[in-house]
Image (cartoon, grey):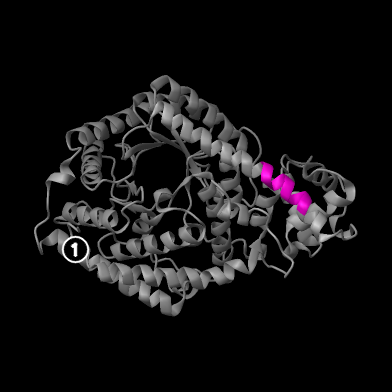
């Protein structure tokens, strides 16, 4: 039963509109690929490393096919054709291409059946590796247990993966359940994934497969020490979205920032490319058992949280439908929202409570990802600590799933270990003292909280119906989300979108969407 007296018919209408929006875009997704999707397939087939110029080999081999005009058939076809013809592995083929010893376009065409068999044998080994990682996670949780929800989620962002390890392990000993390694500033705009362990980054640490491996090992070690499984999170967004999903799946990450629209709105990445990329990245994350975190909180950094709250809900509905398309169950949908109203708004706490309770009721199985106040944080650390306390109170009251802890020094610097410790202490105190608060309290019928939630749902439904009629591409061009306008033929990475030919094949998509998890 709804504590907010939400109209179930309106919820169904909103979800139906979001379904049609996603369906409309899916027809475009199904007929196109991108250079990032193809690089991801190359990685999943075992292509790794860099050439003498430090260019990643997945980029080398995909650029080679793109230049030859053959990418519309898919990298799997060209690698498989070369495997049958030369007897080499995908890695050996990529190395030969990088040295100029092999031109994949000029290799005589082999039988489609032989190509498919060669590729499938390798694809199944990769799929088994990801399945083994999923089972290992489940075994850890069964044997060690995990922290209660809301998970206490903190960030490390030193720029040096080895220093990140020190800070992450300290945070876990202080009580953290999830550690997110913030990416180096602007990595989302790099059209390649850096290689190896990195020790220099600005505002964060580069997302690389080796860095994933280092942090995974460190969190497993400290998790065994404290007696609970610790989840590792990174950022599956930007121009390399599906590649990072693949690396995360292979190194057993547990959470990924993975929004359908974030890169378009906040990094000016071409919408066509992003929407194709997010589908494959989510198919990988879904199969790997990775919880995705969406980025609706970002809208409230560029738009007003009171006036534009309905856009957050509308985007949650859309993200839900895109996730379903990619095979992600609701239990892996960390749909995002945020405590971002101006603290000077009268009764703002009531409206934040309404928004959070509304999300909880509309997406009952989703481990909602709740973001702390940032836009209105100041150098007054005492006021900031109180704002975070109110944020924590709303979270435990409304049964959120993932709590990104606010830091009292949010507006001053990247948090020190003692700042993180105070934030964890704040959350643990409130969560323990108010654990069952939500079960004890009902909301006044037709009171401010109920009316606010009902109004937001009504406005979100109207917006979704408008998007259903106009199409998602046109809606983004008009700036309906976060007040940010983007062109469907503009932005970064447009030249990396390719229409598929009739013979195109991706050996992993069916395995991920239909395979035994």
Question: Where does the magenta region start and end?
Answer: 117-125
| Left or right for 236, reference 344 | right
Against 373, is 277 above or below?
below
- Where is residue 227 drawn, in percent x and y? 39, 23
Residue at x 14% of width, y 55% of height: 347
Predominant SS along the magenta part:
helix
Residue at x 52% of width, y 53% of height: 282
Label 1 packing within 10 angstroms: few (<14), some (14-19), many (20+): many
Q: Is residue 298 or residue 322 the one in the foreground?
A: 322
- Where is residue 141 drawn, in percent x and y? 43, 32
| Left or right for 113, reference 345 | right
In the image, residue 108 lies in the stretch drawn in magenta: no
Residue 64 visible in the shown view:
no
- Where is residue 516 drawn, in percent x and y? 56, 48
Quarter holding the N terminus is bottom left
Against 343, is 446 above or below?
below
- Where is residue 429 drawn, in percent x and y? 22, 31
Q: Quadrant of residue 275?
A: bottom right
Q: Quadrant of residue 167?
A: top left
| Residue found at the very far top of the displayed protein | 225
Against 496, is 9 above or below?
below
Per the image, the residue denoted by label 1 is 452
Q: Is residue 477 or residue 259 the one in the foreground?
A: 259
Residue 37 visible in the shown view:
yes
Against 465, is 1 above or below?
above
Residue at x 26% of width, y 65% of height: 307
| Residue found at the very far bottom of the displayed protein | 469
Q: Is residue 355 or residue 239 the one in the foreground?
A: 355
Q: Quadrant of residue 225?
A: top left
In the image, residue 121 lies in the stretch drawn in magenta: yes
Is label 1 in a helix, a strand or a loop?
helix
| Left or right for 220, reference 46 | left
């Amino acid at each position: 039963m709804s504590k907010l007296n939400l109209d179930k018919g309106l919820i169904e209408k909103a979800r139906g509109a979001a379904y049609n929006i996603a369906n409309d875009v899916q027809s475009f997704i199904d007929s196109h690929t991108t250079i990032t999707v193809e690089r991801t397939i190359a990685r999943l087939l075992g292509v790794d490393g860099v050439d003498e110029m430090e260019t990643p080999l997945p980029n080398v081999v995909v650029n080679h096919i793109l230049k030859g005009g053959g990418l519309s058939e898919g990298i799997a076809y060209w690698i498989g054709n070369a495997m049958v013809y030369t007897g080499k592995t995908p890695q050996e083929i990529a190395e030969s291409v990088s040295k100029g010893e092999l031109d994949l376009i000029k290799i005589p065409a082999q039988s489609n059946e032989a190509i498919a068999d060669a590729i499938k044998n390798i694809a199944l080994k990769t799929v088994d590796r990801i399945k083994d990682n999923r089972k290992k996670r489940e075994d850890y949780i069964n044997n060690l247990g995990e922290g209660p929800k809301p998970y206490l989620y903190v960030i490390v962002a030193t720029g040096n993966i080895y220093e990140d390890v020190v800070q992450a392990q300290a945070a876990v000993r202080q009580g953290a359940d999830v550690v997110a390694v913030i990416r180096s500033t602007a990595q989302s705009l790099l059209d390649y994934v850096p290689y190896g362990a990195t020790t220099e980054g600005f505002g964060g640490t580069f997302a690389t497969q080796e860095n994933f491996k280092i942090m995974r090992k460190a969190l497993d070690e400290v998790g065994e020490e404290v007696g609970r499984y610790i989840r590792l999170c990174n950022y599956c967004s930007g121009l390399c979205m599906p590649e990072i999903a693949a690396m995360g799946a292979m190194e057993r990450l547990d959470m990924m920032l993975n929004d359908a629209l974030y890169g378009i709105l906040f990094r000016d990445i071409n919408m066509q490319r992003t929407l194709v990329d997010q589908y494959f990245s989510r198919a990988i994350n879904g199969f790997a058992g990775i919880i995705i975190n969406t980025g609706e909180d970002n809208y409230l950094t560029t738009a007003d949280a009171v006036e534009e709250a309905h856009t957050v809900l509308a985007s949650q509905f859309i993200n839900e439908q895109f996730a379903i398309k990619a095979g992600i169950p609701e239990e892996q949908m960390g749909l995002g929202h945020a405590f971002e109203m101006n603290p000077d708004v009268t009764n703002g706490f009531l409206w934040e409570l309404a928004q959070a309770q509304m999300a909880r009721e509309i997406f009952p199985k989703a481990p909602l990802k709740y973001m702390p106040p940032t836009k209105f944080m100041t150098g007054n650390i005492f006021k900031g600590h109180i704002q975070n306390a109110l944020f924590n109170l709303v979270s435990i009251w409304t049964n959120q799933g993932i709590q990104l802890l606010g830091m009292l020094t949010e507006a001053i610097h990247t948090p020190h270990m003692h700042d993180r410790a105070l934030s964890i202490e704040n959350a643990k105190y409130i969560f323990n003292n108010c654990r069952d608060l939500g079960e004890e309290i009902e909301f006044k019928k037709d009171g401010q909280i109920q009316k606010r939630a009902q109004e937001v749902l009504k406005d979100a439904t109207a917006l979704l119906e408008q998007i259903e009629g106009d199409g998602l591409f046109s809606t983004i061009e008009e700036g309906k989300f976060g007040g940010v306008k983007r062109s469907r033929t503009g932005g970064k990475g447009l030249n990396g979108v390719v229409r598929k030919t009739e013979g195109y094949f991706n050996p992993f998509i069916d395995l991920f969407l239909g395979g035994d998890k």
